[in-house]
Image: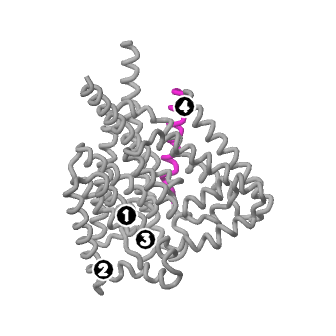
Amino acid sequence: MHKRIMMNRIDNKSLRLILSSALVLFFISDALNKYFQVKYALAVEDGDVFSNTISVSIYVRFLFELIFLYRISTRFNKTALKGVTLMGWLFAIFIFGQVIFLFNYNNPDFRFGYQLTLFNKYIFVFIVYYAICDLVDYQLLITKTLSILGNIYIANSILIFLGATFNITLFKSYFTQDFRYGYDGLIPAINEATLFYMIGVSYFYFNYINKIQKIYPLLLCTAASLLLGAKAIYLFLFILAIYHIFFKAKLIYKFISLGFLALLAFGLFTFLISEENSYLYEYFIYKYEENGFLDAITSGRSAYIYTKFFDNLEIWNPVNYLFGGTDQLKFMIEMDFFDGFLIFGFVGIVIYFRLYFITLFRDITLKDFRLFFCISFFLLAFLVGHFFASAMNSLYLNLVVLYFYSKESDIKNLTILKIEQNAK
């Protein structure tokens, strides 16, 4: 017994070291990616900054993926077997779909290695999950690890404020598009930043409503997210506010919150209609006047459904509808439900969603904050891209959702205990 306790302590220390190192190195490597992208964009007027710059993060991710896979192999059980089996089926479906797709698709620039890398991004979140899912049993460990993540959010949020105050190109969301407003700090892509801040705001909000943490980190993170210039994060903040008003706030605070939102909306409207601030929404108005409201709120992605998506379907035979097949370099839409369907087909996408609901979103009840987070996650993934394939956010997502699960399990157990004590 004593030996087992000692082994658990040693394992916990090593896991904390792995996760702490991963959090810091993931953020630093993504920051270096952003630096090289901005440097390239300033030096070259034309060219794809994402394809033509060094990706430091891919090497860091590969290193930790090996570590995570090793950890899975040393703790293999029935739960992990189920997940790994589903991932194996998903890989087989992906390969089969791609092979069938290539019978009808003749493109000398097709890069199969890129498609494999993309597949790896899609399943990386589950690899991380099965490597660290036992964290739910060690609250102190996960809390200490998340304190590092909280500091990363605070640091990046401060950089966003500095970028907005001093107009620093390195911290801009759209550093290749001067006509668009937004600052995302050291996050390399705006879609990644959207998920990054959705996770961060949710984490700080959960701590605040459960009286674990003061409101100040939540306010800082929320204020920074307002400067991203990403419509999806504004949608998330809006539905979070509605969720709080109707499900968490006391009656008197419901009226106060509704009044505050109305006042905030009026103030924001007054601020935006002034001539000096019109540049903040001119791009949205331009897209709206050119192609309509749907095109404007999806930043042009909806148009790709009628072009790239259906162009891809024209290449398919009936087998591809079941197992997918695509060239993501040519047909990527950046709306995850559509991209996921092109990659995996009907059968594969069902397995993919099944993986989410036996891992991150398992055992959800109506009262869980994870239910709200789950709905928000899939809603935003429908509107934008790089939620499912965000390797950068996979660790952050797992840590925060496992933290929610752990804390909510404690709350449920405490409630049951109180009911039993009252019954006696």
Question: Quick one: label 2 or label 4, which is nearer the N terminus?
Answer: 4
Where disc 2 sits, the SS reads helix
Pinpoint residue 220: horizontal percent, then vertical percent. 25, 58
> What amino acid is found at the position of numbered circle 4 in the picture?
Thr
Q: From mark 4 to mark 3, how far is it between C-alphas? A: 42 Å
Mark in front: 4 vs 3: 4
- The residue at which mark 4 appears reads as 79
Q: Residues within 10 Å of mark 2 (few under 14, many from 20)?
A: some
Nearest the camera: 364 or 91?
364
Where disc 3 sits, the SS reads loop
> What amino acid is found at the position of numbered circle 3 in the picture?
Tyr
Which contiguous range is marked in magenta?
54-76
Look at the image and tell me whether residue 24 can be seen: no
| Quarter holding residue 174 | bottom left
Question: Quick one: label 4 or label 3, which is nearer the N terminus?
Answer: 4
- The residue at which mark 3 appears reads as 174
- The residue at which mark 1 appears reads as 184
Q: Tell me which colouring the rendered structure shows.
A: one colour
Q: Residues within 10 Å of mark 3 (few under 14, many from 20)?
A: many
Asked if disc 1 and disc 3 are in contact, CB closer than 8 Å, the reply is no
Pinpoint residue 103: horizontal percent, then vertical percent. 80, 58
Instruction: Report the side of 9 relative to 121 (left or right).
Output: left
> What amino acid is found at the position of numbered circle 2 in the picture?
Leu
Q: Which quadrant of the figure contains the N terminus?
A: top left
Pinpoint residue 250: horizontal percent, then vertical percent. 22, 53
Q: In percent of the image, x 36 and y 81: which residue is there?
A: 279
- The residue at which mark 2 appears reads as 272
Q: From mark 2 to mark 4, how far is it between C-alphas? A: 52 Å
Q: In percent of the image, x 71 and y 52: which residue is there?
A: 323
